[in-house]
């Protein structure tokens, strides 16, 4: 199952039991000076009484990362720069393992973590700085879903304008736009629905 979010995480309590082990990947945020949203994610997950297992994709070996994948119940891929996140996952060669995890357990992606669940992230160049991922040679992503997520819709005027512009420019893509109060729930047979998170 995949749960794709913009920001609000309350919905995940319906699918993940208290005290479950959640692998937390903050990698997309590494280049940001102000990582307040990562601190908020950690605070919220702790309040929900999950056991957080930190997974530092940039610093840990592939063997260490895969070992943690095997020891957790769900995975939470936080927001930040989608291109940098995808670059680091590819450098460590753990994309396939992450796909297999998502197909067998619960994958939660917020913002950048939601975007990399799509077939490609080429469409997010107006949202994220691609130059922060100079070693990324292609934008092919996890392909967990057959649509493209546009997060933070209607949260700020600039995000709404950018999302509408992206949708217009990529008119052959199937987009799903979600606000910070919505989530996309994808079941085991890839049916999806958009729900309110609070």
Image (tube, rainbow, N blue to C red):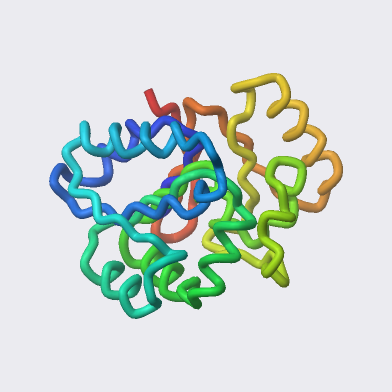
**Which of the 4 image quadrants contains residue 56?**
bottom left
Residue 69, image x, y percentages: 30, 68
Q: Could you say which is closer to the camera, residue 28 or residue 115?
A: 28
Q: Is residue 10 above or below residue 147?
A: above
Residue at the left extreme?
19
Residue 81, image x, y percentages: 60, 48
Position of the N terminus, as image quadrant, is bottom left
Q: Is residue 127 above or below residue 156?
A: below
At 47% from the left and 43% from the top, the residue drawn is 110
Q: Is residue 198 above or below residue 116?
A: above
Q: Is residue 62 left or right of residue 112?
A: left
Q: Is residue 180 above or below residue 12?
A: above
Q: Could you say which is closer to the camera, residue 107 or residue 136?
A: 136
**Which of the 4 image quadrants contains residue 118?**
bottom right
At 47% from the left and 37% from the top, the residue drawn is 35
Residue 190, image x, y percentages: 48, 57
């Amino acid at each position: 199952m995949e749960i794709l979010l913009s920001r609000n995480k309350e919905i995940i309590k319906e699918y993940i039991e208290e005290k479950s082990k959640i692998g937390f990947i903050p990698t997309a945020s590494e280049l940001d000076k102000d990582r307040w949203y990562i601190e908020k994610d950690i605070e919220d997950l702790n309040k929900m009484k999950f056991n957080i297992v930190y997974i530092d994709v940039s610093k840990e070996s592939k063997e260490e990362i895969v070992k943690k994948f095997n020891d957790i119940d769900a995975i939470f891929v936080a927001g930040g720069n989608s291109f940098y996140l995808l670059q680091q996952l590819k450098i460590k060669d753990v994309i396939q393992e992450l796909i297999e995890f998502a197909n067998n357990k619960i994958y939660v992606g917020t913002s950048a973590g939601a975007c990399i669940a799509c077939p490609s992230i080429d469409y997010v160049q107006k949202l994220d700085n691609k130059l922060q991922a100079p070693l990324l040679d292609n934008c092919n992503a996890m392909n967990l879903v057959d649509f493209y997520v546009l997060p933070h819709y209607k949260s700020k005027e600039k995000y709404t304008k950018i999302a509408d512009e992206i949708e217009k420019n990529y008119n052959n893509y199937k987009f799903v736009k979600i606000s910070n109060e919505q989530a996309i729930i994808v079941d085991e047979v890839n049916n999806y629905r958009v729900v309110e998170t609070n």
